[in-house]
Amino acid sequence: MLLRFIALLLLLASLAACNSLKPPPTPVLSPLESRGRGVFVANCSRCHASSGETVIVGPSLAGVATRGSTRIEGMDAEAYIRDSILNPTAYTVEGFPKGVMPSTFKDELSPEQLDAVVAYLLTLK
């Protein structure tokens, strides 16, 4: 009886350990964030990764929603991300050359597309 109890405890402990190794669930994107992901894929993903630390041309944007709120004193993440898209030479990330990101997105993206991509980037915490 004691052996069965110990075996059951070991089984439960191993199941609990397996559950802790599962990746967190993928967040469900709102319709606006989903449209923004599409804008990101079409316009930004050639140069920026959205997960991990992969550097394609520019810095990975994984965690930009968290880092963006600390980059410029007095500027929240949303304002930082939006201004970085509209005025890309204003906040070049250290270690990356200035002037590489196109400055044409302010003319190429509609206001709705800009709002959507900013909403999507704010999900990258």
Image (cartoon, helix red, strand yellow):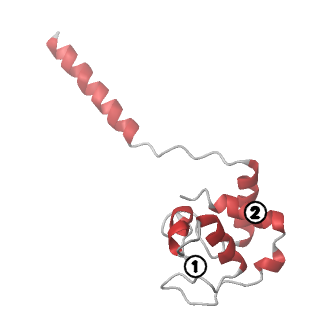
User: The residue tagged with tag 1: helix, strand or loop?
Assistant: loop
Nearer to the camera, 5 or 112: 112
Q: Is residue 39 left or right of residue 19?
A: right
Q: Which residue is mark 1?
A: 58
Pointer 2: residues within 10 angstroms few (<14), some, or many (20+)? some
Q: Position of residue 102 (x, y in %)?
A: 71, 84
Pointer 1: residues within 10 angstroms few (<14), some, or many (20+)? many
- Residue displayed at 82% across by 76% down: 108
The three-letter amino acid code for the residue at tag 2 is: Asp
User: The residue tagged with tag 2: helix, strand or loop?
Assistant: helix
The three-letter amino acid code for the residue at tag 1 is: Gly
Q: Which mark is residue 9?
A: none
Q: Position of residue 56 (x, y in %)?
A: 57, 76
Quadrant location, the N terminus: top left
Q: Position of residue 60 (x, y in %)?
A: 54, 71
Q: Is residue 22 left or right of residue 113?
A: left
Q: Which mark is residue 115?
A: 2
- Residue displayed at 66% across by 82% down: 88
- Residue displayed at 65% across by 69% down: 79
Q: Position of residue 50 (x, y in %)?
A: 58, 64
Task: Give the image quarter of residue 116.
Answer: bottom right
Nearer to the camera, 35 or 77: 77
Task: Give the image quarter of residue 106.
Answer: bottom right
